[in-house]
Image (spheres, rainbow, N blue to C red):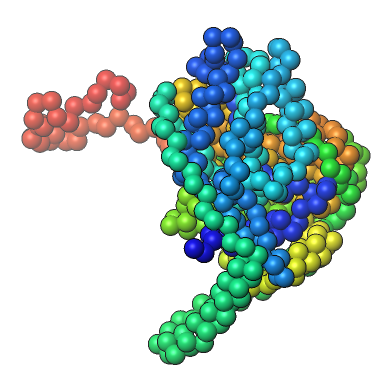
């Protein structure tokens, strides 16, 4: 019987290739819950129930019981079932010294994020942390980026969480790992796969006559989009700032919480999108931090953010793996006026939409799909030397209603994005139940003052909110009021006009 395996895509493989001792390619989430519903008689969190819940859902996410293997010679990674899978290794238990405050939790997050995942096992872990003040506990989830992207993460969250409190846990379905192919079998099957694709492509040439025009148009459109992507700054280096430099292996974690309603108020008043408001807020925060905290001259700085954009189609929702492309957005950090910063961001993202650079970046990824793993690895590492952007800013929309882990309500959800080579800080945002939760993943050596950076972002948001409010007040003051209509007098001969029926046409007292 042949062994079972699944080949990683070129993009998923690139996240493995980019990882080094100092660049950890795992994404994470720090989620807090109400503790009382899951408290044991001894006062702790019921770990047995949480493990049973996770185990009962694993058949829905089979990747979580798979580990990496390699194809001989070409060294491309594949997924195979882990015959030694143990849920207790992946769902771990921590306790903060009572009373555990949020700073202690953030320090624990930094420690956990400084450690790479074990590649000999499935590349994920859930760290349950009890003892948090205000009657809460936390789960620190950590998943390698080669398994999942932000939008897939939202779908995965729905697997573990409920729309209403529930104490029901289904019996776990039996797990029988499928046989792993031997090295020689992997090599033979992958060689046959490539040969079969070549033959199939040659055969399909006969079917191209009727579709040639459409294919050419689509190909030209994609080529133009890919050309825009390559010429939009990806092959040039952004300015060197105090937020960029040699990254070490240690991490710090910062947080911020803002109102989604306030962000939408700014968007509705000034135009653009929620993401435009976020990027303008980041531009103002970077400006404040570099100028006021680091005393750095920001005049003429070419500061760029990489903003992942989902290219996941509706029929791909619920599947793991990465379906993302990247926008390169210039942030106007040398602009002092908050509204001018927002307008500049809107122009920049507008150009990106017009040139469809998300499609262009996705096309470039597809073109690399046939490259051997060694070439992908080399290209990824060479690309890191260019540093075309200064930081990552990713914004993932979440549900605007409460979710529950068994009976415990989810209270907060702070995401974490990995740091690329030369990047001292990365920003990730997740909106949930009316709030936007900001997670700041910072290198311990480059940005030890991550809390000062978070405050700069908060002050930038307040500045933008106030400027929008002032703009609204100015607009209201400038709008001429409608003149008061004089009371009408009955015209001559009005007594001859037919009166309205009783109850109709009469003025209501409130109209005066």
Foreground residue among 95 and 105: 95
Image spot of residue 126 (x, y percent): 62, 34
Residue 490, picture quadrant: top left
- Reply above or below: 258 against 77: above
Relative placement, left or right, of 151 versus 93 is left
- Reply above or below: 420 against 456: below
> Which residue: 24% across, 31% down?
489
- Reply above or below: 424 against 407: below
> Which residue: 88% across, 49% down?
245
Residue 258, picture quadrant: top right
Observer able to see residue 274: no
Image spot of residue 5 (x, y percent): 56, 60
Residue 325, picture quadrant: bottom right
Image spot of residue 462 (x, y percent): 68, 32
Relative placement, left or right, of 328 versus 65 is right
Foreground residue among 42 and 24: 42
Quadrant placement of the C terminus = top left
- Total labels: the figure holds 0
> Which residue: 57% across, 23% down?
47
> Which residue: 65% across, 25% down?
93
Observer able to see residue 512: yes
- Reply above or below: 437 against 310: above
Relative placement, left or right, of 50 versus 187 is left
Image spot of residue 177 (x, y percent): 52, 49
């Amino acid at each position: 019987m042949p062994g079972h395996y699944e080949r990683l895509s070129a993009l998923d493989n690139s996240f493995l290739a980019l990882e080094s001792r100092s660049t950890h390619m795992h994404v994470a989430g720090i989620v807090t819950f109400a503790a009382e519903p899951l408290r044991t008689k001894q006062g702790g969190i019921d770990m047995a129930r949480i493990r049973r819940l996770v185990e009962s859902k694993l058949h829905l996410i089979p990747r979580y019981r798979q580990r990496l293997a390699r194809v001989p010679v070409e060294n491309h990674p594949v997924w195979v079932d882990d015959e030694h899978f143990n849920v207790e290794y992946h769902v771990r238990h921590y306790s903060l010294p009572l009373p555990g405050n949020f700073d202690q939790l953030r320090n624990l997050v930094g420690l956990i994020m400084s450690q790479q995942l074990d590649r000999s096992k499935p590349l994920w872990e859930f760290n349950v942390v009890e003892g948090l003040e205000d009657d809460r506990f936390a789960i620190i989830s950590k998943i390698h980026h080669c398994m999942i992207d932000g939008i897939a993460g939202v779908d995965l969250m729905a697997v573990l969480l409920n729309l209403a409190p529930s104490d029901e846990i289904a019996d776990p379905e039996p797990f029988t790992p499928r046989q792993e192919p031997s090295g020689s079998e992997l090599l033979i099957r992958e060689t046959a796969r490539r040969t079969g694709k070549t033959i199939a492509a040659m055969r399909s040439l006969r079917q191209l006559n009727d579709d040639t025009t459409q294919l050419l148009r689509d190909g030209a459109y994609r080529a133009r989009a890919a050309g825009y992507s390559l010429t939009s700054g990806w092959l040039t280096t952004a300015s060197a700032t105090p937020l960029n430099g040699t990254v070490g292996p240690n991490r710090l974690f910062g947080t911020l919480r803002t109102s989604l309603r306030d962000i939408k108020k700014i968007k509705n008043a000034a135009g653009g999108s929620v993401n435009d408001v976020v990027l303008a807020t980041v531009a103002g925060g970077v400006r404040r931090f570099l100028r006021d905290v680091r005393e750095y001259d920001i005049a003429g700085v070419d500061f760029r953010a990489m903003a992942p954009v989902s290219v996941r189609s509706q029929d791909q929702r619920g599947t793991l793996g990465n379906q993302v492309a990247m926008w390169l957005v210039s942030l106007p950090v040398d602009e002092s006026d908050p509204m001018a910063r927002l307008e500049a961001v809107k122009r920049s993202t507008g150009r990106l939409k017009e040139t469809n650079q998300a499609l262009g970046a996705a096309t470039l990824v597809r073109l690399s799909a046939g490259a051997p793993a060694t070439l992908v690895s080399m290209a990824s590492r060479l690309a890191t030397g260019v540093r075309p952007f200064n930081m990552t800013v990713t914004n993932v929309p979440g549900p605007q209603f409460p979710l529950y882990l068994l009976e415990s309500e989810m209270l907060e959800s702070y995401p974490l994005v990995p740091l690329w080579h030369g990047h001292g800080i990365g920003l990730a945002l997740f909106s949930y139940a009316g709030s936007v939760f900001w997670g700041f993943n910072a290198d311990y050596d480059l940005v030890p003052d991550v809390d000062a950076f978070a405050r700069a972002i908060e002050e930038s948001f307040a500045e933008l909110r106030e400027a929008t409010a002032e703009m609204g007040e100015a607009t209201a003051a400038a709008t001429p009021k409608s003149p008061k209509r004089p009371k009408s007098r009955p015209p001559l001969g009005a007594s001859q006009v037919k009166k309205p029926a009783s109850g109709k046409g009469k003025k209501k007292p409130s109209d005066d």
